[in-house]
């Protein structure tokens, strides 16, 4: 498929934070990720991308640590604010969707898109789960939470 037949990607200031986070999570390579991040930042969104993987039993702690670390490192959220509370809830909501019906012995690989607007924060998960490398399933989860700047 050449560039003239590709569907255009429209991102503007009216793009929801959930859609924006999912667009980041589904990027297939660093080049696409960089383009989407630049488009989002141009519209005033703050964003971060990270990845996590491992056994489905142990993934919760890794996921929370990866999201908080990426969001703090990219200054999407600040310490000592309600943003921490909001991003934790968005992460848990996204994890519920992603992990629905994943066997406890499965391995998972997750790409994480994090986007914040002036009042909303979204965490999107996209990746795979598998009991065996020949049984891989695509999965997705999304969590969106409102936050207030005041403590």
Image: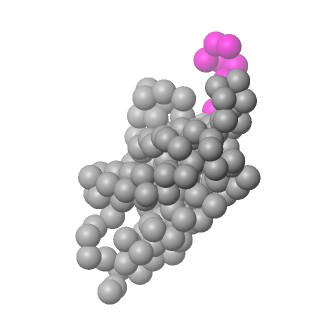
- Based on the picture, tell me whether residue 134 belongs to the magenta stretch: no
Where's residue 139, x and y in %?
A: 67, 44
Q: Is residue 27 above or below residue 98?
A: above
Residue 46 appears in the rendering: no
Check the picture and name the quadrant holding the C terminus: bottom left
Comparing 108 with 146, the one in front is 108
Residue 94 appears in the rendering: yes
Residue at x-position 70% and y-position 24%? 134
Q: Is residue 36 above or below residue 134?
A: below
- Based on the picture, tell me whether residue 4 belongs to the magenta stretch: yes
Left or right for 102, reference 38: right
Counting labels gives 0
Comparing 142 with 127, the one in front is 127
Comparing 11 with 131, the one in front is 131
Which residues make up the magenta segment?
1-8
Where's residue 94, x and y in %?
A: 59, 59
Q: Is residue 95 above or below residue 78?
A: above
Where's residue 148, x and y in %?
A: 41, 81
Q: Spot the residue most to the top.
A: 2
Comparing 82 with 149, the one in front is 82
Residue at x-position 48% and y-position 27%? 29
Q: How is colour applied across the structure in the image? A: one colour
Residue at x-position 62% and y-position 41%? 106
Residue at x-position 38% and y-position 72%? 83
Magenta residues, dominant SS class:
loop
Where's residue 42, x and y in %?
A: 40, 47
Q: Spot the residue most to the bottom.
A: 151
Check the picture and name the quadrant holding the N terminus: top right
């Amino acid at each position: 498929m050449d560039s003239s037949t590709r569907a255009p990607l429209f991102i503007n200031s009216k793009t929801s934070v959930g859609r924006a986070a999912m667009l980041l999570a589904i990027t297939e390579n660093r080049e696409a990720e960089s383009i989407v991040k630049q488009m989002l930042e141009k519209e005033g969104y703050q964003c971060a991308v990270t990845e996590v993987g491992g056994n489905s039993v142990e993934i919760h702690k890794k996921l929370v640590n990866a999201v908080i670390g990426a969001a703090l490192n990219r200054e999407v959220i600040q310490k000592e604010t309600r943003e921490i509370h909001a991003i934790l809830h968005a992460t848990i909501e996204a994890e519920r969707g992603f992990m629905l019906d994943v066997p406890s012995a499965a391995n998972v690989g997750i790409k994480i898109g994090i986007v914040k607007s002036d009042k909303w924060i979204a965490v999107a998960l996209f990746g795979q789960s598998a009991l065996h490398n020949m049984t891989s399933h695509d999965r997705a989860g999304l969590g969106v939470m409102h936050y207030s700047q005041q403590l």
